[in-house]
Amino acid sequence: MAWDEWEQLLDEAQKRPQSSTHMQLNQLPADPGGGSTQGDLKVSQKDLAAVGDAAYALHQGFLHFSDFARLSSIKAADGLESEGYAIGSALNHVVQHWVDQVQSLLDATAHISNHLDYTKKAHAGDEQYIAGTISSIATLDQGFDERKAN
């Protein structure tokens, strides 16, 4: 917004009567089709399952292949140290940090996979609860309707 434009809006606001109060909310324009406006973010159970499966596959693959790097590095570090090279202890230090980073990634991928499994089960339980509640309300309504008819 340019400064001139700001000054013009400020001037217009000051000319309005002080007794009126207004609130303006920023929002999306109304849907031209007449339907309700929905957000852009949508996710399906299929999408969630794909993310969970990918996280699980990454976890399993990384668990398997990261161990090769760890074992090879430890062997190399031990060999260098036994030959009197100072870089052997430095490589052992790197290996320890590698193990820490691997564990962080494994924890994160397991968390994603487990959380999506939990979410799926929790939402299924919520669906059953809601369906039961709605059917209970329908049964009560039916009873009230029968009572009115008598």
Image (cartoon, helix red, strand yellow):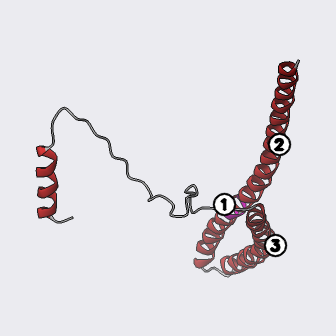
> Which quadrant of the figure contains the N terminus?
bottom left
Identify the secondary structure beneath mark 2: helix
* Tag 1 and tag 3, C-beta contact below 8 Å: no
Residue beneath the point at 66% across and 76% down: 81
Identify the secondary structure beneath mark 3: helix
Mainly helix, strand or loop, the magenta region? helix
Residue designated by label 1: 104
Residue designated by label 3: 64
* Tag 1 and tag 2, C-beta contact below 8 Å: no
Residue designated by label 2: 125
Q: In this rendering, would 67 be left or right of 2?
A: right
Magenta stretch: includes residue 127: no
Q: In this rendering, would 67 be left or right of 36?
A: right
Q: Camera-side residue: 81 or 17?
A: 17
Check disc 3 and give the amino acid type: His
* Quadrant of the image occupied by residue 27: bottom left
Q: Camera-side residue: 58 or 19?
A: 19
Q: Camera-side residue: 112 or 98?
A: 112
User: Label 1: few (<14), some or many (≥20) within 10 Å?
Assistant: few
| Cα–Cα span, label 3 and label 2 | 35 Å
Residue beneath the point at 15% across and 62% down: 5
Mark 3 or mark 2: which comes first in sequence?
3
Mark 1 or mark 3: which comes first in sequence?
3
- x, y percentage for residue 48? 74, 62
- x, y percentage for residue 128? 84, 41
Give the extent of the magenta segment. 103-107
